[in-house]
Amino acid sequence: MSKEPAAPPSTPPDAPPALELRGIDKRFGAVHANRAITFAVAAGSIHGLIGENGAGKSTLMNIVYGFHRADAGKIRVQGRAVEIGSPQQAIAAGIGMVHQHFMLVENFTVLENVVLGVEGGALLAGALAAARAELGRLARDYGLEVPLDAVVSELSVGLQQRVEILKALYRGAEVLILDEPTAVLTPHEADQLFVMLRRLRAQGKAVILVTHKLREIMAVTDRVTVMKQGAVVAEVATRETSPRGLAEHMVGRAVLLQVEKRPAQPGAELLSVKALEVRDRLGVARLKSVSFNLRAGEIVGIAGVAGNGQSELLEVLAGTRAASRGEISFGGRDLVREQLDPRARRALGLAHVPEDRLRMGVVAGFSAADNAILGYHDAARFNRGGLRDEAAIRAACAAKMAEFDVRPPQPELRLAAFSGGNQQKLVLAREIDADPQVLLIGQPTRGVDIGAIEFIHKRLIALRDAGKALLLVSVELDEILALADRILVMNGGEIIGELARADATEEKIGLMMAGVRAEASP
Amino acid sequence: MSAPAKLPRWAELGLLPLINLGVALVVAGVIIKILGESPLAAFKLMATGALGTQEGIGYTLYYATNFIFTGLAVAVAYHAGLFNIGAEGQAYIGGLGTGLVCLYLGAWPFWVVLPLAVLAGAIFGAMWAFIPAWLQARRGSHIVITTIMFNFIAAALMTYLLVNVLIKPGQQSPETREFSANAVMPAAHELLAKMGITVVATPLNLAFGLALVAAVGVWIFIWRTRWGFALRVAGANSAAAVYAGISPPRIIVGAMLISGALAGGLGLNELMGSQHRILMDFPSGAGFVGIAVALMGRNHPVGIVVAAVLFGALYQGGSQLSFDMPKINRDMVVVIQGLVILLCGAMENVFRAPLTALFARVRSGKGIE
């Protein structure tokens, strides 16, 4: 992590806060999303906003940025009371936001994206020239170098994020909100982002960092506000707190950040992959000659920046995507040559918790009970005489809910009504209850609150200790390090290195994720 | 957190359609007023014409039978995520199958002819839906486009067959000869007479009962079998279907075969039950009304039966209206029906957002200012 001089606040101590929220209250129907939130960010500081999913962080930031209107409460910017009813008004008030999912037109250039919406005239040429000059200045002041004439889709994710920050600054943002900005970055890119944020702080901007990663809060913020169930439960100076203390505030009880586990005792090889290759529809290789194996009683973690072939690997193993070449041996069969579909693979004992739960793992509009049989709906235990056995389906779901502490325990409730953590526990319960030999699991704790993460990690380790093999794909390096017994690092569709957990450090993995091959060990 | 609030079930299924219907009637009332007739008198006439007499009820249910078949057809496809606009053509070709059985096997006893006619209607209708389904599943040709094209192909094919092949020799109008007595669906008044109940003769016939059986069958299939479950999964989230080992192309073809087969039931009512011959354009738009019926009935068999009866009443009441109010001609009645389709079908969501907001306010305990 690069060293930056500690920035002295560039505003006098009695200046009004850059952004101040007083008594913000918001309900969505029966849900009380924000309860009398009071929150202030000083100019020239980085303020962390942390909380579990559903704690109301996003709602609060969406109110500040004008996506929602608060039922009650006041917003003041630089001491002035402002009415924010739309993002336009938020921008006019000097508030900028970088969303987790970038709002860029991919086939426009950087320059075109920056001026989009603030062209200020019928003809583009003038706006583009003015923007070019202004962006040159911003680049000098903040070290935000971006090739202005490059098409956005050709930029790395880190650079695209920089474009988003430039967009906000170009619109005169004094308060910059970043929503989970590191979710898509390599550790190195994240460090670069933090350097940039510190520069913004030194220039007197107020930065709000919304995240669920305690490490980032500790690394870069000056103060941190913790939200729980729609209310602020703590506001502290970062240097006076610890990750453990923050986690306890978030969950309301002591949390194990590191799950206890015994050393792995790998047994027989259960699944092996040889020279696996996947090409997409355009013929581009997404997986290039991937080979590895999984043994009973171990968790193999796949680390890598999102989009380097991990998703394709999981899908091709699960059977939702076809392999172009290679071999997957499992249960004495070659899954590639026999072209077994996901159902047949499940029957052999290969279960799959998909990365993108809502896109693939569940049907949000169906009941929890229906979701708890998805993929197993043909099984004899859920059918009787040609009809679904509704009682058995409901009972099975209720049993899973009890075992995995899914709340509320109502099999008839629509899945969308459950929180992300509870949805994930239900998916996990479905796949684990089928007693698989191998469990493929992608992003097990994406969108899952800390309390549930602990539970899910414990279940995965219990599964390993029961002699099953797990393949874990996660963009959270912390999660890989916490769970995996062996780590494979992917870059550009290849496995470019393998590390035993004992040898793995964040730095080593980070280098490999960026494409630097491990030198042959002596 | 920002998930949209949901309407309670009774409001979703009952209140919202009623509001839509009410607005449609208000707009229709304005038009009737402009034409110089009293809207209230007109609506009263429509209501009594459709539901006030035995004859009216008979006709209403007779029309409703067609709409139940086509509404179910649209709904089954809808649950698989497919918008089947081709129920009209599938009903037309399905009717051909039923008609051919009646024409050429009509000498056999009724209880032999009936299952064969049902089967032939279903198979012909399903086959007509199969080609667009296959094109969608294997080639990605959009089913909305292909099914609507197949309506035209069906119309052209039937015209050719009726004019050149099936026409009863020695006559001008392109119709087949009449079915023999064994191939005629028992009328409701005949069946009721056997039970000692005397009612006015109407075209209402046994096919209405078959339509209700089909509705129950569709309900069981969609919500109580694993195949229906697979179909709904594929319709709601095709990525999840692939993940669950369900093949979306197979579901597309299967759902469209069932959809076409259901549309093919229309011939049982229209040809076997009423016309007793194959003639030109006998579905007369029921395939399209089926879309509105399915939308209004929320793609649920119970809702579809209710909506089909409502549309049957509109048809019957509308013809009564054009009889008795000379300023309102047949086309005006079509306009009124069109308004109902527009507001209950195409624009059914217009009042959803305000209604949802209203419920959210009431529930959050703030009341209505």
Image: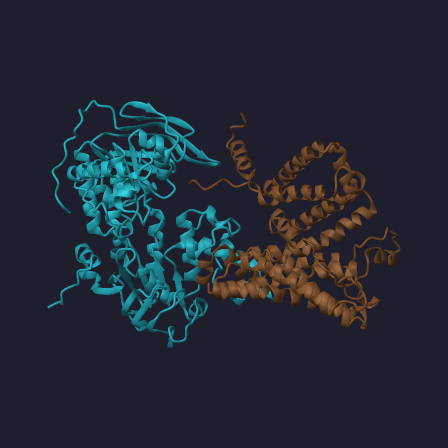
Q: How is the image coloured?
A: by chain
The answer to whether residue B278 of the structure is visible from this angle is yes
- Percent across and percent down for residue B353 are 53, 38
- Residue drawn 31% across the image and 35% down it: A118
B255 on left or right of B167: left
Would you identify the image quadrant in which residue B333 lies? top right
- Residue drawn 46% across the image and 67% down it: A343
The answer to whether residue A214 of the structure is visible from this angle is no
Would you identify the image quadrant in which residue A322 lies? bottom left
A198 on left or right of B369: left
- Percent across and percent down for residue B85 are 59, 55
Q: Quadrant of the N terminus of chain B?
A: top left
Most foreground residue, A382 or B221:
B221
- Percent across and percent down for residue A310 are 30, 61
B12 on left or right of A400: right
Would you identify the image quadrant in which residue A279 lies? bottom left
- Residue drawn 50% across the image and 32% down it: B364
Question: Chain A's shade in the image?
Answer: cyan
- In this rendering, is residue A449 above or below B86? above
Colour brown maps to chain: B
Most foreground residue, A444 or B239:
B239
- Percent across and percent down for residue A280 are 35, 64
- Residue drawn 67% across the image and 60% down it: B91
Callout count: 0
